[in-house]
Amino acid sequence: MKKLILTLAAVACAISPAVAKEKMQRAWQATRTTDPVTGVSRCVVSALDYVGKTRYSRTGFLYPVIENHPQHGLLVGVSSGGRFRLPTGTILWRVDDQPFREVRPEDGPVTTDMSAMPAGLTPQDPVAAKAMADAMAVSGRAIMAATATSSFAMGDTARAMLAELRAGHGLLFRAKAAAADTGLPDSGMYRVGQITKDGLKPVPLDASLASALADCGI
């Protein structure tokens, strides 16, 4: 009997770590969608809120996002959540003890549609037409900075940020406007990272990140 008890105890000890591992939450997850109108498919890696196996985002909160966009290429940054998306503004972003970065919405994808301009208002002179196009691009980026619900880095910056994430342990970020740069200390400076039952914590850069990136082919 004693030998049987010891054997059962050893089996229980061998099983327990596997059970615990199954109960660990995946901080990062890949989400695939297909637009029912355009048919464009996308795969986004994000760290959302969760209860059990249910993932969700909340209005007024920010979430880190990584995407290999079919048109704009690699995008790394932050998106606002919930049904009603709010402007994100400039984001302060830092992995571990790396220097912090500023991710501005106007640095991300911007589309300026010249076709929307009435033909009669388009200058015939090439120089004037280019000047108008440049002015519209600047105006478009200014509008985006005020209204965009995502702040993304692109190109070399996005690739450098992704490399930091892959090699890092924890991610902190917040809206730059959440804390004033001058005057009395602002409690908004502590609105960083991910909300957990134990308060705000760095978003873990664990094995779930590599798994989700692989799921999206990134």
Image (tube, grey):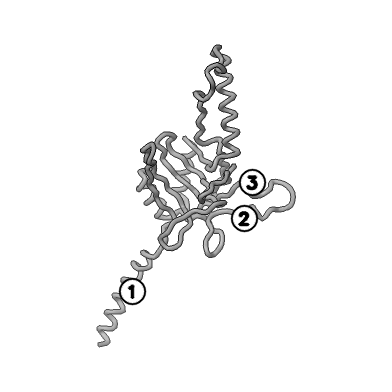
* Disc on the earlier residue, 2 or 1: 1
**Residue 43 position by quadrant:** top left
Label 3 environment density (alpha carbons within 10 Å; few <14, some 14–19, many ≥20) = some
Q: Quadrant of the N terminus?
A: bottom left
Instruction: Inspect the image, locate mark 2, and give the three-letter code of the amino acid beneath it.
Output: Tyr
Q: Is residue 19 left or right of residue 150?
A: left
Three-letter amino acid code of the residue under disc 3: Ala
Identify the residue position indicated by label 3 in the image. Answer: 177
Q: Residue at x 31, y 79 (%)?
A: 9
Q: Marks 2 and 3: which is nearer the front?
A: 3
Choose between 64 and 38: the one closer to the eye: 38
Dots 3 and 1: beta carbons under 8 Å?
no
The residue drawn where x is 52% and y is 61% is 196
Earlier residue among tags 3 and 1: 1
Residue 52 percent coordinates (x, y): 42, 63
* Nearer to me, 212 or 146: 146
Vertical order, 136 against 148 (above or below): above
x and y, in percent, of residue 85 in the image: 54, 46
What separation in Å lies between label 3 and label 1 (alpha carbons)?
50 Å
Foreground of the two, 9 or 25: 25
Which residue is labeled 1 in the image?
A: 13
